[in-house]
Amino acid sequence: MKISVIIPVYNAEKFVTQAVESALQFDEVHEVILVEDQSPDQALQVCEQLTEKYDRVRLYQHPDKENHGAGPSRNLGIEKSTGDFIAFLDADDYYLPNRFDAEKELFKRPEVEGVYGALGVHYYTEKAKEQYYSLFKDKLTTVYKRHDPKEVFPGQIYMLGSFGLFSIDALTIRRDSLMKKMNLLFKSSLRLHQDTEFLYRLSYYLDLYPGILDKAVAIRGVHESNRITLIDSKKINPATTRVLLWKEVNDWAENENTIPDHVKQHINRMYRSFQIANSPASKKWGMIFKYLFTDYQSIRSGIYNINFRNNLF
């Protein structure tokens, strides 16, 4: 196996060395691609030092040297990659020694186009643990059962609460399958949740298989300045960001001719559900009562989604 590990780097000078070295522990890792995204800290200098220290580390920036976000940075990393397989890692996260154990066996089968595993959590400081333990606790982010690849897309779309989640940090993909079947990689229109939107589309186009689900293969690093932590803790309005996410999913579904109509309808209802959740209180209940009579399914779709319920109530 020749794996390219892609790490977008922004404001991560304290953590990126650990991320890189956690990837370099594996002989299967052909290269670690750092995409520095105009960090306000000293991350660029740290990345330059890592390229000098390790032959397998490569450093890139966007051509205009501006900040573009994690999605376009990952796209640039994919473009520059030369491995047969692609794995991702956030600059403040890290891999565990079992990260590619399942992949080494599963990818012997040509029908396996991607493998996903479980993500653990580590609190870098006591302050971070005090602030965010109620969100993440010590739980695994994982898919709860071993599903057939054809069940992964509908499982994420229809039954998030009972299906579970997998993280981009614990995902490995055949590069050829990704480039042939995904005509659009990460969307530049989303600054947040771009990985979630990507995983929805990826699981529709590619056959993704379960790897190690009962223990972590990678670790999410939680600290005070995680962007996703700020969303989950509601310092950034989660309803607003999820409206944008579901708008992108809805736009994609409407233009994908192979998606069945009932799936498109469900996605559209989820989008409308989050629109309701993000409405001002003065309008929210009026919209709910309107949809109760005109489109009950939009309300029902939202009520069964825990994120919608949290934002609504």
Image (cartoon, rainbow, N blue to C red):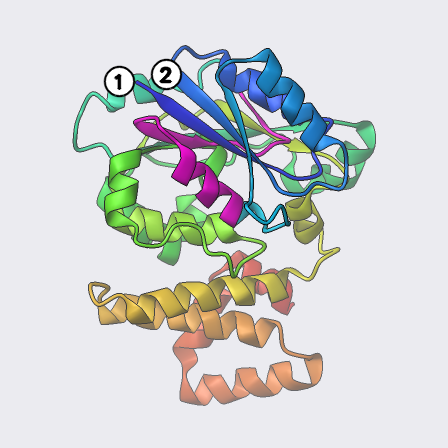
Where does the image place residue 191, in percent across and percent down from the top left?
Answer: 58, 55
Task: Name the secondary structure under disc 1.
Answer: helix
Residue 8: which quarter of the image? Answer: top right
- Can residue 68 be seen by looking at this rendering? yes
Q: Determine the residue positioned at 17% across, 33% down.
A: 111
Q: Is residue 310 or residue 186 the one in the foreground?
A: 186
Where does the image place residue 58, in percent across and percent down from the top left?
Answer: 51, 25
Say left or right for 42 vs 307. Answer: right
Determine contact: label 1, label 2, CB under 8 Å: yes
Number of numbered callouts drawn: 2
Q: Is residue 301 magenta?
A: no
Q: CA distance from mark 1 to mark 2?
A: 7 Å
Point out the stretch of residues depicted in magenta: 72-95
Q: Is residue 80 magenta?
A: yes
Q: Which mark is residue 101?
A: 2
Where does the image place residue 203, in percent across and percent down from the top left?
Answer: 32, 47
Image quadrant containing the C terminus: bottom right
22 versus 266 height, above or below? above
Image quadrant containing the N terminus: top left
